[in-house]
Image (cartoon, helix red, strand yellow):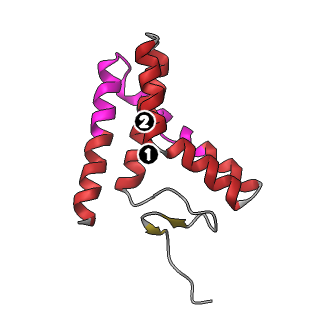
Amino acid sequence: MKALVRLEDLALATLAAYLFVMLGYPWWLLAALFLVPDVSMIGYAFSPRIGAILYNVIHHRGTAIVIFGIGVLVHQPLIEAAGLVLLFHSSADRALGYGLKHFDSFRDTHLGTIGKVSDR
């Protein structure tokens, strides 16, 4: 089941990349912007709770879809592109096993624990 869900996430990332290019933007720009949503990790400098909230809002696919939809409604390709960058990033993250964060630790996600668990 886990592999099937990851394939679904990969398909969503592929769809976002396709739509990004169909908007007329070069594929390399999507690659260049790929890590921009991770700036949301700055919230962890304040606390794990603030970090998780900020990270989750930016990495939620619903946020990406709303931003893309706003771009479509107001006929603003840059807003559409921003939504697609978020959708591509969050879907690719989930395909790689990085999920939305729990409040206790950056490593604890809705998909499980990221990284190696120490024996301490």
The secondary structure making up most of the magenta span is: helix
Q: Quadrant of residue 84?
A: top left
Instruction: Residue at 25%, 44% (x, y): give it.
Output: 11
Q: Nearer the viewer, mark 2 or mark 1?
A: 1
**Which quarter of the figure is the N terminus placed in?**
bottom left
The mark found on residue 90 in the picture is 1
**47 to 119, vertically: above or below:** above
Front-most of 53 and 18? 53
**113 to 55, vertically: above or below:** below
Q: CA distance from mark 2 to mark 1?
A: 13 Å
Highlighted range, magenta: 14-38
**Which quarter of the figure is the C terminus placed in?**
bottom right
Find residue 69 and report its horizontal and vertical position in percent. 42, 23
Instruction: Residue at 70%, 53% (x, y): give it.
Output: 50
Find residue 94 and report its horizontal and vertical position in percent. 39, 54
Residue 19 is one of the magenta-drawn residues: yes
Q: Residue furthest right?
A: 46
Residue 62 is one of the magenta-drawn residues: no
Instruction: Residue at 50%, 34% (x, y): give it.
Output: 33
| Amino acid type, residue under disc 1 in the picture | Ser
Secondary structure state at the residue bearing disc 2: helix
Q: Quadrant of residue 25?
A: top left
Instruction: Residue at 57%, 63% (x, y): give it.
Output: 102
Judge the density around disc 1: few (<14), some (14-19), many (≥20) Cα neighbours within 10 Å: many
Front-most of 101 and 92? 101
Secondary structure state at the residue bearing disc 1: helix
Q: Earlier in the sequence, mark 2 or mark 1?
A: 2
The mark found on residue 31 in the picture is 2
**113 to 69, vertically: above or below:** below
